[in-house]
Image (tube, coloured by chain):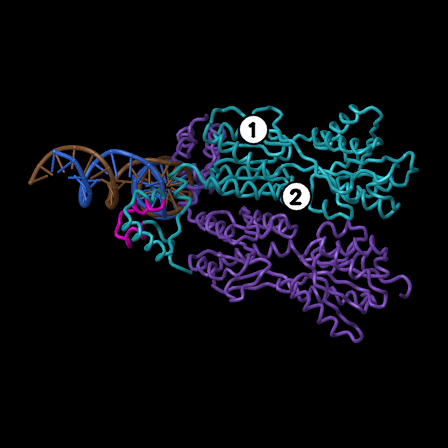
Chain colours: A purple, B cyan, C blue, D brown
DNA sequence: GTCGGCGGTTGAATCGTTTCATAATTACGT
DNA sequence: ACGTAATTATGAAACGATTCAACCGCCGAC
């Protein structure tokens, strides 16, 4: 099958020039006379030459690729992160290769190893847990790393993340501003940092508002089904013991709650119960009642992460940066102001 | 900052052996005496040596990575495909690097170029459109390629795909078997091959069944919203003009139809209307009425694709293979047999 | 007529591995 | 002890690009 790979030498021979000239055509085209360049380009296309990146990299030192390791590629946040990172990278002539750790430490470690062997320009990682040690090693090896959607407790590694406390605050503030007073927070165990942060923000908003109260309902998971069962509990209550505003720690839970509230009890959303989620997944806007939610500035985060990374690579002043973005409110029907007094 | 990268030479010096021996420790550990090996391994960990993959690849010829290019990484089918491919690859000591073309031909082409420059072991591609030409070139360059979820019209390139005609057949057959007779097919333009195939299968099932009829309703897109508006049309009809079984070309459409049918008209699913989707996305089982659907054997497809690819790399008998899988029915509540006669 | 300068071109050296023919060492049977 | 085989270790060559000092014409200045 196909004769052995075409090398720069073959091109040079056919075009009757030195190998250095071919290399120049590839990398510094304007240093080469027009006629020569054309001759070389013809030879390249005639032979179907494709540059061997391994050789280039070996000699030139570093590669053009950026490694991105995400927790779950099927999570819309990460897939748009990946896409945005790709675009940002393309603008600086780099390519992103994506690794899916599936929240598995072993897989994460494997990808880090592979990327390091490939001498990637740098890595963007949303780590499974605390991997400060490995990061430290990478740093010592001269590899630039930026954490995404997580911060380094040791403050040594740069990060680009989002302020979940603020997100929780905004969500509940919005419920309060639209007239609700009896707020419920539905989330899984507060051992998950994100849930804890969002709850913290929610509590802060309630504390600032006289006459407002907050009840915490623990769901068994962050899924639609768990949301449905939590929603059934809430909907089954007598009106005076029922919350009038519910803040769910993510959109899946909120969708479950919505299903339960609408179908099982036939309550009206938002008139009898306002509902707000978190993440702005695709389904949020195509829910039966379009769901108000909190959105992370995904594209901006990705671009910033790439920027911080290249800054780290070029600048190399050794200082770590931590950028924290504010999430934003996406208002939809599920929290519209009540039409007539409760 | 860290001093310049540690090379195999440094390790050899520290361990007092020749470079070849270090290489053997890395690649053929059993060819090295125990004591020597240990000495080398100590030196490696002491210096924090990381093999330079570019150099290895340059010398050894081919890399250990497989390139996978998907249409949309946020599509659950592709993300589980990616994950399964990763696992299958890991078993043969390879790594998958993922590129997301976002259904964009330019991006697809970029990834193909990058992967070719990286001299990947092979590529798995779910192509945006017809890229037979580029594939042909790759083949001539000696790169193995396997198409995933698409076939090559020219029959030159191997492929692993799924039989959508069979899927459509199974879906409608199931509706007929459970007693429905007036079937509706809801899908976007049949210019999309998948939609056309599924419809073809549906027609076949209806043709085999005396007394059954099929109506085609065209949706504006393959989304929840488009499904909802199609569903409203259907639900608004008088009972004798309304289909009793609806087959949607994908789950999103079906979920939209379900929302419309339940909320707007309050019809009962499955008693008054049976509903079946396609793809088995996560939301299918957590829909208000769990959705019956058609599932592709994703993991199996991924493993097979990797197998076919390595077969192509090793065997190299030049023959292209096309593997076609049968989709399977996932029965849930939305098509349960009617409780009492219509 | 000589010389400096400049746009183009050359080709050897280099990057860090793997590979492999060869050498060195050890083991063993007689 | 000695020859032979088996086991280990050695180090130079090779992979295919980039880089860079040197070189080559050629033009214009003096």
Q: Residues within 10 Å of mark 2 (few under 14, many from 20)?
A: some
Residue B152, how many percent across, how many down? 61, 27
Q: Is residue B60 above or below residue A294?
A: above
Residue A301 is left or right of residue B54, and the answer is right
Q: Judge whether residue B151 is colored magenta.
A: no
Residue A135, how many percent across, how many down? 48, 59
Q: CA distance from mark 1 to mark 2?
A: 23 Å
Q: Judge whether residue B22 is colored magenta.
A: yes
Q: Work out which residue is located at the far front of the displayed protein and give it.
A: B340
* Residue B191 seen in the current view: no
Q: As rendered, which of A86 and A10 lies closer to the eye? A: A86
Quadrant assignment, res B20:
top left
Residue B339 is left or right of residue C11, and the answer is right
Q: Circle 2 sits in a helix, a strand or a loop, which is it?
A: loop
Q: Chain of mark 2?
A: B
Q: Residues within 10 Å of mark 1 (few under 14, many from 20)?
A: many
* Dominant SS in magenta: helix
What's the magenta region? B9-26
- Residue drawn at 76 percent across, 60 percent down: A276
Quadrant assignment, res B301:
top right
Number of marks: 2
* Residue A276 seen in the current view: yes
Residue A117 is left or right of residue B182, and the answer is left
Q: Mark 1 = which residue?
A: B158
Residue B245 is left or right of residue A43, and the answer is right
Instruction: Determine if marks 1 and 2 fall on one subunit.
Output: yes
Numbered label attached to residue A6: none
Pick the quarter of the image with the N terminus of chain B. bottom left
Q: Work out which residue is located at the far bottom of the displayed protein and give it.
A: A210
Q: Mark 2 = which residue?
A: B75
């Amino acid at each position: 099958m196909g004769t052995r790979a075409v090398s720069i030498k073959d091109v040079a021979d056919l075009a009757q020039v030195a190998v250095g000239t071919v290399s120049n055509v590839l990398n510094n085209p304007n240093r080469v006379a027009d006629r020569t360049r054309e001759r070389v380009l013809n030879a390249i296309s005639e032979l179907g030459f494709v540059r061997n990146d391994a050789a280039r990299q070996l000699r030139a030192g570093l590669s053009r690729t950026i490694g991105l390791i995400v927790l779950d590629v099927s999570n819309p946040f990460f897939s748009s992160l990946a896409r945005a990172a790709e675009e940002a990278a393309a603008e600086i002539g780099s390519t992103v290769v994506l690794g899916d750790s599936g929240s598995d430490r072993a897989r994460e470690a494997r990808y880090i190893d592979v990327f390091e062997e490939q001498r990637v320009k740098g890595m963007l990682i949303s780590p499974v847990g605390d991997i400060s040690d490995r990061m430290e090693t990478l740093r010592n090896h001269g590899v630039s790393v930026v954490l995404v959607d997580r911060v380094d407790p040791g403050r040594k590694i740069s990060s680009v993340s989002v302020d979940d406390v603020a997100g929780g605050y905004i969500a509940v503030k919005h419920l309060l501003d639209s007239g609700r007073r009896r707020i419920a927070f539905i989330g899984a165990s507060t051992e998950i940092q994100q849930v804890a942060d969002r709850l913290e923000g929610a509590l802060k908003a309630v504390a600032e508002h006289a006459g407002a109260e907050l009840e915490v309902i623990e769901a068994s998971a962050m899924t639609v089904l768990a949301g449905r069962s939590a929603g059934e509990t809430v909907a089954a209550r007598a009106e005076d013991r029922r919350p009038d505003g519910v803040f769910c720690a993510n959109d899946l839970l909120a969708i479950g709650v919505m299903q339960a509230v609408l179908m099982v009890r036939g309550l009206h959303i938002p008139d009898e119960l306002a509902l707000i989620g978190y993440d702005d997944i695709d389904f949020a806007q195509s829910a039966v009642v379009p769901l108000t939610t909190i959105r992370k500035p995904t594209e901006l985060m990705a671009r910033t992460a790439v920027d911080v990374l290249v800054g780290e690579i070029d600048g190399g002043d050794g200082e770590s940066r931590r950028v924290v973005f504010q999430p934003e409110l996406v208002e939809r029907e599920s929290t519209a102001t009540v039409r007539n007094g409760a």
